[in-house]
Amino acid sequence: MTYQTTFLIQDLISDNAGKRPKSLAIQEGDLQVSYKTFDEASNQLANSLYDVGVRRGSRIPLLVGKKTDILASMISVLKADGIYVPLDIKAPVDRLVSIIDQLETPFLICDVELAVLANNIAAELVDHLEVLVIPSLTIDGWHKTIQWGPSEPPPRAKNLDMLLSRASKSKRDYTSISEDVAYIVFTSGSTGAPKGVMIPHRAVLDYARWTTDHFQITPRDRLSSHAECHFDLSVFDIYTAFYAGASLYPVPKSTSMFPAKFYQFVEEYNISIWCSVPSLYTYFCKLGKLKSERMSSLRAMTFCGEVMPTSTIIDWMTAYPKIRFVNQYGPSETTCASMYYDFDTVPTNPSESVPIGRAIPNTEIFVLNGEGKQASENEIGELCIRGAGNGLGYWRKPDETERSFVQNPLCSEHFERVYRTGDLARLRPDGEYEYCGRRDQQVKYMGYRIELGDIEAAMSAQPGVSVCAVVVVKGESENDIRLIAGYEGGSQDNNISPDTLRKILGEQLPNYMVPKKCFRLENIPLNRNGKVDRHQLLEIIEGQLKEKDSLG
């Protein structure tokens, strides 16, 4: 594999435009954008942004709905030496205001459809915030004129039409370096407050170099793009495709959640690489919709962002024996993924957890025990990561950065920073790491320390459970707690009652680990990134408990 010698993310587009100008960069529905068009359009927008005042280090939030347009905006901000901040367009206004307020930026980029929302956000902020409205990207470049429809442009909206029409399509000279921040992605963390993770250019390029090599991506590959750009899982799709000069195919939301439509999408566009959160794979299994005769173009499927239930991967690997399956692990703070596990054979025991594997190149993984020393084999401790993929901390949160990005406790000779993930793991005898839950999900009950993940793993192993989670319901005193489980059943022919589930768990787990109650729910709540929303689940379960108590 011949690696790129690129040092900045935006150069991936320019390099591909020079080598394969007519090759397809993105196809979204009927819209096809070549690398040449994508490069020239992003140059135009970058030059326009520079003209209005964007400079090196400027934080530019993006409130853009269409995937092609937000990708062009992201690259354009980088070409203007700025830092892009993708926003969740469905997030509450208060959250968006909080994020933009933290960024202390004079600009917000949006599209026409979201200009009113962007204006409302700007009106909430005390300081001046100019709303830069971009047109849509077409097969020939930016659309010539913004169509506002019957409504007038919002007061703070600045139409970039005229600037774009006069802007040069030539590349600017960049002043950024590879250590500079490329993007900030905001996560909620354990507190629910927005927290901006800063990721530099070199981290994205290092990860994309590995994915391109490990999955043997070539310009002939076609990658589906499921995750929204505000979710770090999107880094795999976007920058693997751009690094390799492959093509990116955004998946419509209405398509992802309907197996028949998704199969058709894969087959229509001959998708070869699919990456998404495990919950989508589990959802397909729950519906009993695995069709082994479909999706013949797929050669690799990979997942990241949450725990993959072993029963789910067994079903998928059994249905698609010719496809390569890879588990990836890594928090947002370490650029999408830092570890991987290749499945050589179909797992045989659904009660055994899926390994998170070993470190990708340029990365070191180790586990610290409770004494702050390196854990021995099979000893559970906190997973720590050091390497090229590590971010630069949290935007304007030095205290939180200092707590999570720390001096390597195993190294006293020189400065060496590691990221403490808060995840618990152990090193198995075969050299692979196994995820053992969250440090903040470890509870003490009846004198025992319990990992909620252990209970969830036992539940997930049951054929009649598709999605599950365990929450802690607190009573009047600090020590008065109850472990309560919520789960979704399998298909109609493969279901399990709450009483039966508790009985099975009682045969597999110590008594103190068996949930006091299990609730079969129609839907386990998920957050916008497809992960279990534990706060919302706790509210649902507390409501169920109150209802049962009121009925006696």
Image (tube, helix red, strand yellow):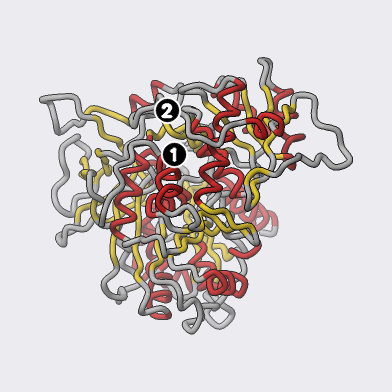
Q: CA distance from mark 2 to mark 1?
A: 10 Å
Q: Residue furthest top?
A: 127
Q: Of callouts 2 and 1, which one flags the residue occurring earlier in the amino acid sequence?
A: 1
**Up/down of 321 relative to 479, above or below:** below
**Which residue is rendered at x = 58% and y = 27% of the image?**
49
- For the point 42% across and 80% down, the residue is 319
Labels 2 & 1 near each other (Cβ < 8 A): yes
* Along the viewing direction, whichever of 512 and 77 lies nearer the viewer: 77
Instruction: Please tell me whether mark 1 sits on a helix, a strand or a loop.
Output: loop
- 15 up-or-down from 396: above or below: below
Residue 434, given in percent of the width and then of the height, sits at: 27, 56
**Residue type at the position of mark 1:** Gln
Q: Nearer the viewer, residue 262 or 541?
A: 262
What's under tag 2, amino acid-wise? Tyr
Image-based side of 43 in relation to 123, left or right:
left
Q: Which mark is residue 174?
A: 2
The secondary structure type at the circle numbered 2 is loop
The residue that label 1 is drawn on is 10
